[in-house]
Image (cartoon, grey):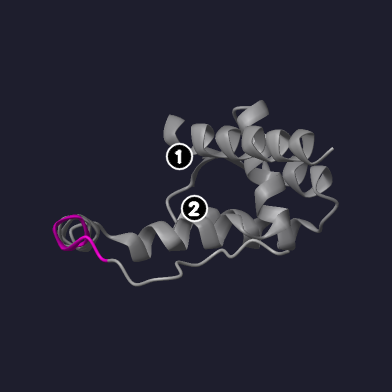
């Protein structure tokens, strides 16, 4: 017999629902969704992970790490920058990218840890 994953009766705790609705409405959840959308692409996730390991990488190195053209790597890096996940600096003719701050690094590390735990649990 399959276990039901929905309530079998309607039961709403009005005080809790209203409190949480108010808290959620006070946050910019659409911007949070955009962050996760930016990281939902496998190439960008690989780039972000590489930048958690090596603090700074030039576009050419990123392209080689993810087996992409420099143009493709640049496109992904620009998107990560646009979403506030990465930053860059120019040094002569080279452009170096890094994660924007420690929060982004923690976000990537936590997601990877969670994924490893899921894989272990599913074994």
The residues tagged by marks 2 and 1 sit, at their Cα atoms, a distance apart of: 8 Å
Q: Is residue 13 magenta?
A: yes
Q: Nearer the viewer, residue 35 or 10?
A: 10
Q: Is residue 18 above or below residue 55?
A: below
Q: Nearer the viewer, residue 45 or 100?
A: 45
Mark 1, secondary structure of its residue: loop
| Residue at the image position 80 percent from the left and 48 percent from the top | 66
- Disc sitting over residue 54 in the figure: none
Q: Is residue 9 magenta?
A: no
User: Is residue 57 in view?
Assistant: no
Q: Nearer the viewer, residue 114 or 91?
A: 114
Horizontal side of 10 relative to 105 (left or right) equals: left
Chief secondary structure of the magenta span?
Answer: helix
Horizontal side of 60 relative to 25 (left or right) equals: right
Total count of labels: 2
According to the image, label 1 marks what residue?
100
| Residue at the image position 59 percent from the left and 27 percent from the top | 55
In magenta, the rendered stretch is: 12-17
According to the image, label 2 marks what residue?
81
């Amino acid at each position: 017999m399959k276990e039901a994953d929905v309530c079998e009766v309607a039961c709403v705790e009005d005080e809790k629902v209203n409190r949480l609705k108010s808290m959620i409405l006070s946050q910019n959840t659409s911007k949070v969704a955009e962050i996760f959308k930016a990281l939902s692409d496998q190439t960008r996730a690989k780039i972000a992970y590489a930048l958690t390991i090596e603090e700074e990488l030039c576009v050419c190195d990123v392209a080689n790490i993810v087996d992409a053209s420099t143009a493709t790597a640049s496109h992904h890096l620009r998107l990560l920058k646009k979403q506030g996940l990465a930053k860059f600096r120019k040094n002569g003719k080279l452009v170096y990218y890094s994660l924007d701050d420690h929060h982004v690094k923690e976000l990537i590390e936590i997601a990877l840890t969670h994924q490893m735990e899921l894989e272990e649990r599913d074994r």
